[in-house]
Image: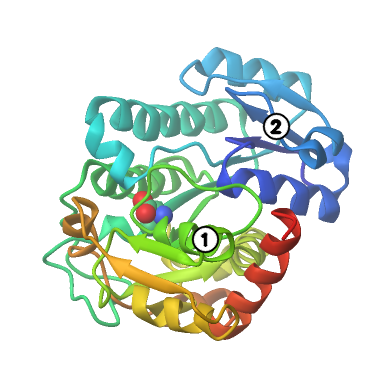
């Protein structure tokens, strides 16, 4: 059984990953850490939590030793739109913390590290349709630059030190548990809250902006599958392309309208449009399918139905 430490456990991915890993490996084998206290009652009640600033390598090391950790899911990160507001902070949090985790994992002989990359690692020079696993990488947001740098670092630590570090290029992730903050794909979550609360939504991307997306259940399932795959199956130590569904704001709005008649979505693109315009419209994840059996479950309509069911309950409508 792995002994896991999760950083960023109170974030969008972390809060669900913590619960899923505790369910799978037992609550005593998964330590949740974050720089902020968990607000979610389920998360708080589900097992041990420790305050952690990932920029302090010694602090991570103390927790690793105290809880006999052998695996780190390093989920802390500043997203794309937030990164543009404070590039220095994005670099510090996204790159320096990853370097701390990789150094510590190497020095203490940890078994495995997971770190999320993103479709933001691609850029204007990458093909935008069915973007291949290996292609031109020229991200032009600081977030994308940190993600591509992080991939190169992971690859370096594997090649030089044989550290078993694995990574995925997450698309926009959609979930009803913890809202994201500061991303370009966040509209695909906000739209559900507004559709339920007011039947109106002003989208910050153009109606035809197609981006790769995934429901959180698929993201968690795929991540666990990657981490449990035998080492010989993992044939890239850069991040794997990883996708489920590509859709535009208009397509998701139309799908929501089937469940909430009268819902109206209008469009007022802002600075996030220029970020989205440099990202893939769809991604080729056939290498992940071939190497470790990646296969998503949720279609657009299944995802919309499940999101609305859970969010209506959460918002008590
Ligand atoms: C963002 O929008 O910044 C993220 C991402 C695609 O990595 N959701």
**Figure coloring:** rainbow
Give the residue displayed 35% in from the left and 43% down from the top: 150
Reading the image, the residue beneath label 2 is 39
Give the residue displayed 52% in from the left and 60% down from the top: 198
| Any part of residue 216 in sight | yes
**On the rendered structure, is 235 left or right of 5?**
left
| Any part of residue 238 in sight | no
Q: Residue 157 is drawn in which quadrant? A: top left
Give the residue displayed 46% in from the left and 40% down from the top: 161
Reading the image, the residue beneath label 1 is 198
Of residues 238 and 191, which is closer to you in this image?
191
- Please state, as top left, top right, bottom left or bottom right, where the C terminus lies in the image: bottom right
Of residues 21 and 204, which is closer to you in this image?
204
Q: Is residue 91 above or below residue 126?
A: above
> Residue 35: where, in percent of width, then height?
57, 22
**On the rendered structure, is 190 left or right of 73?**
left
Of residues 115 and 173, which is closer to you in this image?
173
Q: Secondary structure at mark 1?
A: loop
């Amino acid at each position: 059984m792995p002994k896991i430490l999760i950083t960023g456990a109170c974030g969008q991915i972390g809060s669900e990953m913590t619960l899923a890993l505790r369910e799978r490996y037992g609550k005593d084998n998964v330590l949740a850490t974050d720089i902020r206290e968990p607000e979610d009652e389920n998360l708080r009640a589900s097992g041990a939590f420790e305050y952690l600033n990932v920029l302090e390598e010694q602090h991570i090391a103390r927790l690793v030793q105290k809880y006999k950790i052998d695996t780190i899911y390093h989920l802390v990160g500043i997203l794309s739109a937030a990164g543009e507001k404070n590039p220095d902070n994005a670099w510090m949090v996204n790159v320096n913390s990853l370097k701390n985790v990789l150094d510590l994992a190497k020095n203490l002989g940890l078994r495995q590290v997971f770190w999320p990359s993103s479709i933001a690692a691609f850029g204007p020079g990458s093909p935008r349709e069915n973007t291949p696993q290996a292609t031109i990488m020229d991200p032009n947001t600081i977030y994308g630059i940190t993600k591509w740098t992080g991939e190169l670092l992971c690859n370096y630590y594997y090649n030089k030190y044989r550290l078993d570090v694995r990574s995925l290029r997450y698309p926009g992730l959609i979930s009803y548990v913890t809202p994201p903050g500061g991303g370009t794909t966040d509209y695909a979550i906000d739209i559900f809250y507004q559709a339920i609360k007011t039947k109106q939504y002003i989208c910050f991307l153009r109606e035809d902006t197609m981006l790769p997306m995934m429901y959180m259940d698929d993201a968690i399932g795929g991540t666990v599958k990657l981490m449990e795959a035998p080492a010989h199956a993992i044939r890239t130590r850069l991040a794997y392309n990883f996708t489920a569904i590509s859709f535009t704001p208009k397509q998701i709005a139309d799908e929501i309208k089937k469940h909430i008649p009268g819902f109206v979505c209008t469009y007022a693109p802002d600075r996030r449009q220029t970020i989205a315009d440099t990202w893939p419209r769809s991604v080729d994840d056939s290498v992940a399918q071939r190497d470790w059996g990646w296969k998503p479950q949720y279609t657009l309509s299944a995802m919309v139905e499940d999101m609305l069911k859970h969010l209506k309950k959460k918002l008590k409508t």
